[in-house]
Amino acid sequence: MAAKTGAEYKERLKNADNNIYIHGERVKDVTVHPALKGVVDSMARLYDLQFEKPGVMLYTSPTSGHLVGTTFLRPETIEDIITRRMAIQAWAMTSGGMMGRSPDYLNAEVMAMGASSSFFAEADSSFAENTKTYYEYARENDISLTHTLIHPQVNRAKAQYEQKDANAALHLVEKNNEGIIVDGIRLLATQGGITDEILVFPSTVKKAGELDDPYSLAFAIPNNTPGLKFICRESFDYGRGHYDHPLSSRFEEGDAIVSFENVFVPWHRVFVCGNSSICNRTFRETNAVVHMSHQVVAKNIVKTEFILGVALSLMDAIGIDQFQHVQDKGTEIMLTLEAMKSHLYRAEHNAKPDQWGTMTPDYHALNAARNWYPRIYPRLIEIVRVLGASGLMGIPTEADFKNPEIGKIIERGLQGKSLDGYERVQLFRLAWDLTLSAFGSRQMHYEYYFFGDPVRMGMAYFDNYDKEQFKDRIKDFLGKGASSGSKFSAV
């Protein structure tokens, strides 16, 4: 096997017949279902791009000699990190960064897991072999993955074992010679059901104790495994076409509740089993969070560039780019973009090999970026919304332009400085889909909670920051400046 094409991606989904529900009905074929066809086509486009840009998107497998996806690459040099990032951003460019769970996100995770496989041997030596083997399997077969990290939001004031229904969350039911049986519910699988497999892993933020061991699991299984169900939220792709909904008609990834009904997981697919200590340390100690953050920051740079392009196009379309407050808003987006680029540059060029020999970006830079971007993204969207003003409300549809009675009226009334009415409305519909539509609102909510609650993340950032050097500097400054033998200066 090797890197797959878009057609092969779709054929796998058809053959898998994943157990996916949306709008109260089971989906027979995700490749043609109105709520899923748009994003499936966009995913297929990513895989086709691998063969259109093989110099960027493909490399020779170290085990099979086949061409495999560059986003699976285990970097050994800084140049390797940059090579992988170029592939990440080539994919992000197809959606303007609007696909937060494009395959490269979890490709980075399984790469880090496989490279640090000895970490998982702490509980059982077979788990180390499992992680290494799974990385190679995913790479050689170009496996697309969804994942789930979160327990149901029942009572966040209590641990899982303290819940009134302690069995609602995914938990270990049984171990036997062949594998494990798991049962319960997990959230929130983006692209659930339109990928090959699901990766179950612990949260990157919420820590567990020994009494949570039955909930402390990590494994990967095919999405058509018996007993596995994906229950999707309402789709924000309303089937209105690319003109009316230029983003949501293409990149509505969807999010799903995942139900495990006494699901069997064979031992060779298990990475962690009933060990809260390993789960708590997995993402940081394997450097998975570093490599995943590198993908996210690279993607968010493309996303910020896209937002800037929309903002500048709005300014030009209605001739407001000479106003001081308008230029200042554009500057805000530009400063955000350049700051994110600086974080990425520092992360890549300060990279060092980890204990397993994997070249790993500077996490200090990436951690700052991943904490900052969720806080600034709502402001970027607000700027576009403010620039569009009432123009984002008075936007007819493509069908209105085709109506001979009213088409000429809106063509004349909605023309721009250098655009005809049809072109100007098309641009404003893009800005609307980015900011005010259900899709745009989900994008803002998604970015805000991408890695978890920003306040909780901020607390962790504050706790782990090296603060003593700065306090020592102030102590040193005050000590050198104080009068000898007296706490107070002479009057």
Image: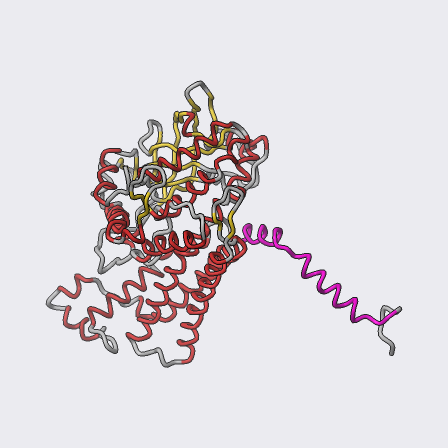
Q: Residue at x 13, y 64 (%)?
A: 402
Measuring from the top left, give residue 176's x and y in whole percent: 45, 19
Front residue of 4/246: it is 4
Measuring from the top left, give residue 226's x and y in whole percent: 33, 27
Q: Main secondary structure of the magenta part?
A: helix
Viewport quadrant of the C terminus: bottom right
Q: Quadrant of residue 277?
A: top right
Q: Is residue 32 above or below residue 484?
A: above
Measuring from the top left, give residue 153's x and y in whole percent: 48, 40
Q: Residue furthest left?
A: 404
Q: Is residue 148 above or below residue 50?
A: above
Queried whether the magenta region covers residue 457, the answer comes back as yes
Q: Is residue 446 visible?
A: no
Front residue of 201/184: it is 201
Q: Residue furthest right?
A: 485
- Left or right: 343 as drawn, with respect to 226: right
Front residue of 40/429: it is 40
Q: Quadrant of residue 9?
A: top left
- Left or right: 328 as drawn, with respect to 138: right
Queried whether the magenta region covers residue 63, the answer comes back as no
Q: Is residue 49 visible?
A: yes
Viewport quadrant of the N terminus: top left
Q: Residue at x 49, y 52 (%)?
A: 361
- Left or right: 25 as drawn, with respect to 128: left
Measuring from the top left, give residue 105's x and y in whole percent: 39, 47
Q: Is residue 21 above or below residue 227?
A: below
Count how many numbered circles sit on residues in the image. 0
Q: Residue at x 20, y 71 (%)?
A: 421
Which residues are the magenta region? 455-484
